[in-house]
């Protein structure tokens, strides 16, 4: 079993990694304007799911959930917007 003092740090690390893993994709699309391999349905559905997580986090008043999902949603919506713009 994990130490209770370690659990919040694991959660923060997980939030950081799963939030910022989308940054390289967004940067690549901005640089290359190539979105052929991006599925609009998948990214749109994922953005919708993240929006639901954000509502959940706000309803709980859970700051880590709110912050990580706000940033993730912004990155996802950026990718969706770039897909719509560049096809």
Image (cartoon, rainbow, N blue to C red):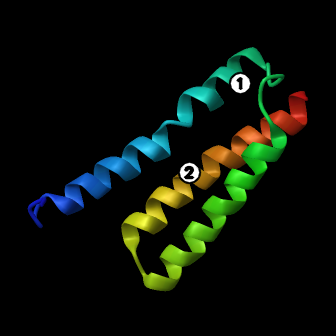
Using the image as rendered, state which of residue 15 and residue 75 is in the foreground: 15
From the viewer's perspective, is 61 left or right of 39?
Answer: left
Is the residue 10 above or below the residue 34 in the image?
A: below
Q: Residue at x 30, y 48 (%)?
A: 13
Tell me residue 7's x, y (percent). 20, 61
Q: Quadrant of the C terminus?
A: top right
* Quadrant of the frame with the N terminus: bottom left
Q: Find residue 29 and name its label.
A: 1
- Residue at 56% over, 37% down: 22
Q: Which residue is mark 2?
A: 72
Q: Secondary structure at mark 1?
A: helix
Where residue 68 appears, as percent x and y from the top left, is 46, 57
Q: Secondary structure at mark 2?
A: helix
Whether pointer 1 and pointer 2 mark residues with C-beta atoms closer than 8 Å, the reply is: no
For the residues marked 1 and 2, what is the alpha-carbon distance in whole angstroms? 16 Å
Which residue is at the front of the view, 30 or 19?
19
Residue 2 falls in image quadrant:
bottom left
Q: Where, by quadrant of the figure, is residue 86 drawn?
A: top right
* Mark 1 crowd level (few <14, some 14–19, many ≥20, 10 Å Cα): some
Q: Is residue 12 above or below residue 25?
A: below
Say few, some or many: other residues with alpha carbon within 10 Å of mark 2 (under 14 / 14 to 19 / 20 or more).
Answer: many
Q: Which mark is residue 78?
A: none
Q: Position of residue 4 (x, y in %)?
A: 12, 67
Circle nearer the N terminus (1, 2):
1
View extreme (front): residue: 1
* Residue at the (56%, 68%) spot, across then down: 53
Residue 24 in the image, given as x and y percentages of width and height? 55, 27
């Amino acid at each position: 079993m994990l130490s209770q003092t370690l659990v919040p740090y694991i959660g923060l690390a997980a939030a950081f990694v799963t939030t910022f893993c989308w940054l390289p994709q967004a940067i690549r699309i901005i640089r290359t304007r190539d979105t052929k391999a991006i599925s609009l349905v998948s990214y749109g559905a994922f953005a919708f799911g993240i929006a639901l997580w954000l509502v959940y986090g706000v309803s709980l008043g859970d700051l880590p959930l709110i912050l990580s999902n706000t940033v993730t949603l912004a990155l996802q919506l950026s990718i969706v917007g770039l897909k719509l713009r560049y096809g």
